[in-house]
Amino acid sequence: MADRHTVKFFQADVFTAEPFGGNPVAVVPDADGLSDDQLQQIAREMNLSETVFVFPPTDPAAVVRLRIFTPSQEIPFAGHPVLGTFFILAELGLITVKEPVTRVMQECNIGLFAVELYALKGKVERIVMTQPKPEFLGRWRRQTISIRWRWRWDSRNLSLPTRSGRSRWYPPVCPS
C-alpha cells in the first residue's frame, strides 16, 4: 500500500467577493516535506489553473517561498495565485496583518517581490503585489499570426486583429 499522509489545502476565489466567482486557486499552506512529484500530483488532482505550495523562505528577506503548479507543470510566476495565497495565509493567521497596510516580501522561482495587504477592522480588504517586468521575446508577422490563430485583420483598423476561432485565449500582439 502507498504511503499516505494528510495534506491540508484551501481554495480561494480571486478578483471577486462572490463564492464560486473570479479565478479559483488552490493553496497548500504547509508544503514542506512534499516531493516535486507529489506537488505535481496534487496540482493535477486539484485541476485548477494553478495550485500554490507554500514553503519556508530560503531568503531571509521573504516571509514565504511560493511554488506554483498548473495541472501539467511548475511555472515560475503568476499573479492571481499570489494574491489568493496571501489572502489565505492572512485568514489563517500565518501572516500578521496590521492596519492600514502590511508590506512583506514573497520569494518565488524568479526572485523576491513585494506584497501589500491592506486591512480594515482586522480583515484584509485588498492585496497589491509587484511583479516582474514583462519580457518581449520577439515579434510575429501578421501572416504568421493569422495562420496560427485563425485571425483576420479588422478592415476598419488594420492594427487590431479579430478572432475567428473557438478558443477564448488571446495572445498579446504587437502589430509591426
Image (spheres, helix red, strand yellow):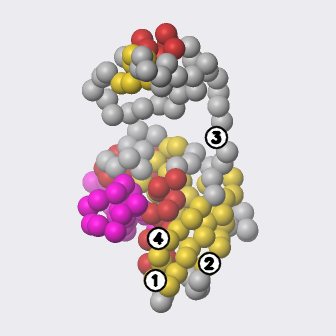
Tell me, yes or no, if residue 27 can be seen here: yes
Residue identifier under label 2: 102
Which of the two labelled residues, at mark 1 and mark 3, occupies the earlier sequence position?
A: 1
Q: Give the range drawn in magenta.
A: 1-30
Residue identifier under label 3: 134
Per the model, the C-alpha gap separating discs 1 and 3 is 32 Å
Q: Is the residue under label 1 in contact with that under label 2 (CB below 8 Å)?
A: no
Residue type, numbered disc 3: Pro
Q: Residue at x 65, y 31 (%)?
A: 136
Tell me the element at label 2: strand
Looking at the picture, does residue 89 appear above or below residue 75?
Answer: below
Residue type, numbered disc 4: Phe
The quadrant the C terminus occupies is: top right
Q: Is the residue under label 4 in contact with that under label 2 (CB below 8 Å)?
A: no
Q: Is residue 117 left or right of residue 58?
A: left
Give x and y (percent) for residue 93.
49, 82
The quadrant the N terminus occupies is: bottom left
Residue identifier under label 4: 87
Per the model, the C-alpha gap separating discs 4 and 1 is 10 Å
Single out the mark in the foreground, 4 or 1. 1
Which of the two labelled residues, at mark 4 and mark 3, occupies the earlier sequence position?
A: 4
Q: Which residue is drawn at 51% across and 14% down?
A: 142
Which of the two labelled residues, at mark 2 and mark 3, occupies the earlier sequence position?
A: 2
Q: Is the residue under label 3 in contact with that under label 4 (CB below 8 Å)?
A: no
Residue type, numbered disc 2: Thr
Tell me the element at label 1: strand
Magenta part, dominant SS: loop
Looking at the picture, does residue 171 appear above or below residue 147?
Answer: below
Give x and y (percent) for residue 49.
38, 47
